[in-house]
Amino acid sequence: MTATVVLAPVLDLRAAEPLKGELLAARGQALMLDGSAVERLGGLCLQLLLSAIRTWRADGQALTFVNASEALTTQWSAFGASLADLSTQDALQ
């Protein structure tokens, strides 16, 4: 079974704790992160998402970003994070 988490439009300090809770609740199963609504990405949520990518890899589970908004991809890249992590391919590659 694949869980889906819809990312909030504003991924800032206030969004970090709820996002962390959603990620922890989905741990142990394949996960799709829907980034279609994201308008702003802050550093703390970026760190959470990067940690999730590595955690899902270590657990041997797929983590896939779907429908990444232009704002999400632009800001992800501006932080220096790899756009390859936002590809629609799962994180098991």
Image (tube, helix red, strand yellow):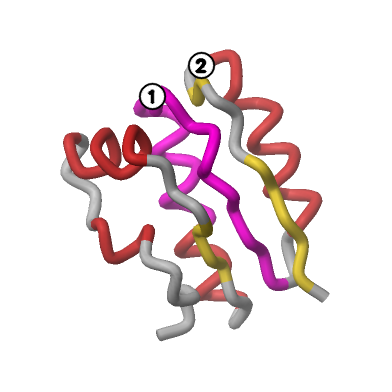
Q: Position of residue 31 (x, y in %)?
A: 66, 64
The three-letter code of the residue at mark 1 reads Gly
Q: Which residue does the image show at 24% across and 49% down from the upper left?
A: 81
* Nearer-the-camera pick, 83 or 29: 83
Pointer 1: what residue?
Answer: 42
Neighbour class for label 1 at 10 Å: few (<14), some, many (≥20)? Answer: some
Q: Residues within 10 Å of mark 2 (few under 14, many from 20)?
A: few
Res. 63 image quadrant = bottom right
Which range of residues does the magenta coloring cover? 30-52
**Which one is earlier in the sequence, the residue at label 2 or at label 1?**
2
Disc 2: which residue: 13
Residue 28 shown in magenta: no
Task: Please give the name of the residue rendered at 52% of the width and 58% of the height, measured from the top-left corner.
Answer: 66
- How many marks the image carries: the answer is 2
Q: Amino acid at mark 2?
A: Leu
Q: Position of residue 75 (x, y in %)?
A: 27, 34
